[in-house]
Amino acid sequence: MNKFQFYFLFLCFITIMRNKISYIGFEKALSPFGIFRLPDILKIYPAFDSRRLHEWQKKGYITKLIKGHYIFNSIEIEAAQLFQIANVLTRPSYISLESALSYYHFIPEQSFSVTSVTTLKTNHYETPKGSFLYQSVKPALFFGYQVIPSNKRPILLAEPEKAILDFLYLHPELKDAADIETLRLNSPELEVLDQQRMNRYLQLFDNEALNKRFELFKEVMHVGTV
């Protein structure tokens, strides 16, 4: 057997192995990822033919969220899954702003987009599973989040104090009491805020405009003194 015959037989073997991957086995192997990417697939199936992804999309087995990111359609999409998707589509990022405020019941309504903070550029994704908005902050402000255990993947979520400060920091248009009142914040829920932690985080922001905005927030919402 010459090298050309060997190479031909090798290609035939690879093709057969690719075609032997069943969708049932594929989903079972990749389901722990929840949201998966081609690099995740190749860790398990090094000879995987990426054309199978297009085939399985057409059959309705999987959905492409954005380029290179997929999710199984057997996964029921609820808030936790949306938060997981948001964490994965942009890294590093954590859930904050309106989505975190809604999670902590600080605001009465759900946000139309899942909102996150990232050290990368501000970005927005519209996907078949939902809308995902990312607001950029400098790396020094990427703190104050917790890791919440969840099915498939843990969720990175802003602590209540950081969610408030992220929101005030990224909304400089909040200039007076009327602006704060339009947010319709739930005053009783704000009692959970840890004032000492809030004070530490304000010092880390080191932003005079934010300090003034937070003083206005405290006055309007009758939050305890820092």
Image (cartoon, rainbow, N blue to C red):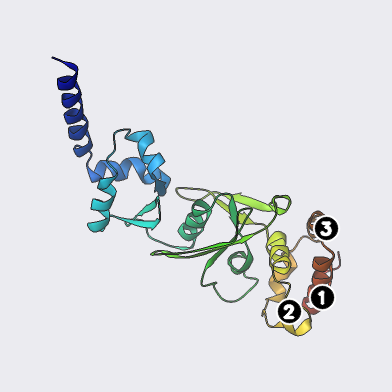
Regarding residue 200, the answer to whether it shows in the image is: yes
Q: What SS does tag 1 mark?
A: helix
Identify the residue shown where x is 80% and y is 69%: 214
Tag 3: amino acid: Asp
Q: Reply above or below: 124 against 16.
A: below
Q: Quadrant of residue 213?
A: bottom right
Figure check: 62 above or below 128: above
* Residue situated in front as seen by the camera: 214 or 11: 11
Q: Position of residue 176 (x, y in %)?
A: 79, 81
Percent coordinates x, y for residue 152 in the rendering: 45, 48
In the image, is 98 to the left or to the right of 211?
Answer: left
**Amino acid on which disc 2 is placed:** Ile
Dot 3 lies on which element?
Answer: loop
Residue name at image x 46 percent, y 57 percent: 81
Tag 2: Cα neighbours inside 10 Å, few (<14), some, or many (≥20)? many
Cα distance, mark 3 to mark 2?
21 Å
Where the N terminus falls, by quadrant? top left
Q: CA distance from mark 3 to mark 1?
A: 17 Å
The residue indicated by pointer 3 is 206
Closer to viewer: mark 3 or mark 1 = 3
Specify the quadrant of the image occupied by residue 209. bottom right
Rate crowding at label 1 as few (under 14), some (14 to 19) or many (20 or more) other CA atoms within 10 Å: some
> In which quadrant of the rendered view does residue 196 lie?
bottom right
Residue 93 in the image: x percent, y percent? 59, 53
The residue depicted at 17 percent of the width and 33 percent of the height is 16
- Amino acid at dot 1: Leu
- The circle on residue 216 is 1
Q: Quick one: label 3 or label 2, which is nearer the N terminus? A: 2
Could you tell me residue 150's position as x and y percent?
Answer: 50, 51
